[in-house]
Amino acid sequence: MNTMLRKSVLGVAGLAFAGGLAAGPLHATTATTASPVEAKPVAVAVQADKPDSGKLIPHGVQGAQSRIDLDGEQVANAKAIIAATKKAGLPERAAVISIATSLQESKLENLGHLGDRNDHDSLGLFQQRPSSGWGTPEQITDPQYSTTAFLKGLKQVDGWQDMPLTDAAQTVQVSAYPDAYAQWEQQAADLVAQHWNS
């Protein structure tokens, strides 16, 4: 993807976010054994529900959708994006936008320098550029750092929560192909639904 037009929406200094999440809740229930006198409380793990599709795709998908098969590394990168989104205290929709952006930019692969095939100095899951202020090559190729940098830019977009995905992603990425992000919305939403509470 040509990122010559790309400019940094953000300064990446001070990327500290407070937060943290716990695993799904445990609810205590009482199990009754043969004798009612011996009833003991038993901890039962309750799987949290999948995120509501209205939160994941509030506007419905736009245009034809693309889908690729993912290997273990790509799924791990999707999970890293979800974890960074949760750590930043942002909702599921931010993870959908982030994953769709990464699917377009790198197919969820943490790209190193690609030599002649490289688009300028673009690296990592989001093809962020050190020369545009996104961070050092080492930082940009760290999935948590690169996601946090993307999310910091997203949070600076007024009304991103109510925008179509491709508009929100494009405002951060400033791509030469602004409509390309839309095609990944369904797969991104499926990944968030599958892994948000796992």
Image (cartoon, rainbow, N blue to C red):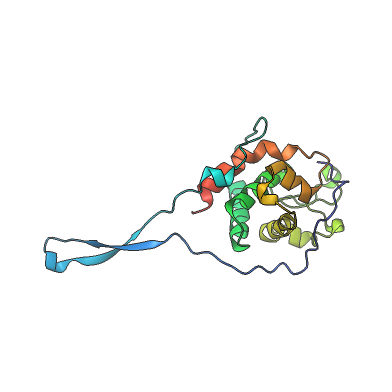
Count of numbered badges drawn on the protein: 0
Residue 57: image location, x then y, percent: 59, 42
Residue 163: image location, x then y, percent: 69, 45
The reply to whether residue 51 is in sight is: yes
| Frontmost residue, 54 versus 102 | 54
90 with respect to 9 (left or right):
left
71 with respect to 125 (left or right):
left
The reply to whether residue 71 is in sight is: no
| Frontmost residue, 177 versus 109 | 177
What residue is drawn where x is 73% and y is 47%?
A: 169
Vertical relation: 159 (above or below) 37: above
Residue 79: image location, x then y, percent: 58, 53
Vertical relation: 166 (above or below) 86: above
12 with respect to 60 (left or right):
right
| Frontmost residue, 195 versus 119 | 195
What residue is drawn where x is 58% and y is 48%?
A: 75
Q: Residue furthest left?
A: 35
What residue is drawn where x is 68% and y is 36%?
A: 183
Residue 34: image location, x then y, percent: 12, 60
| Frontmost residue, 53 versus 110 | 53
Q: Quadrant of the N terminus?
A: top right
What residue is drawn where x is 55% and y is 43%?
A: 54
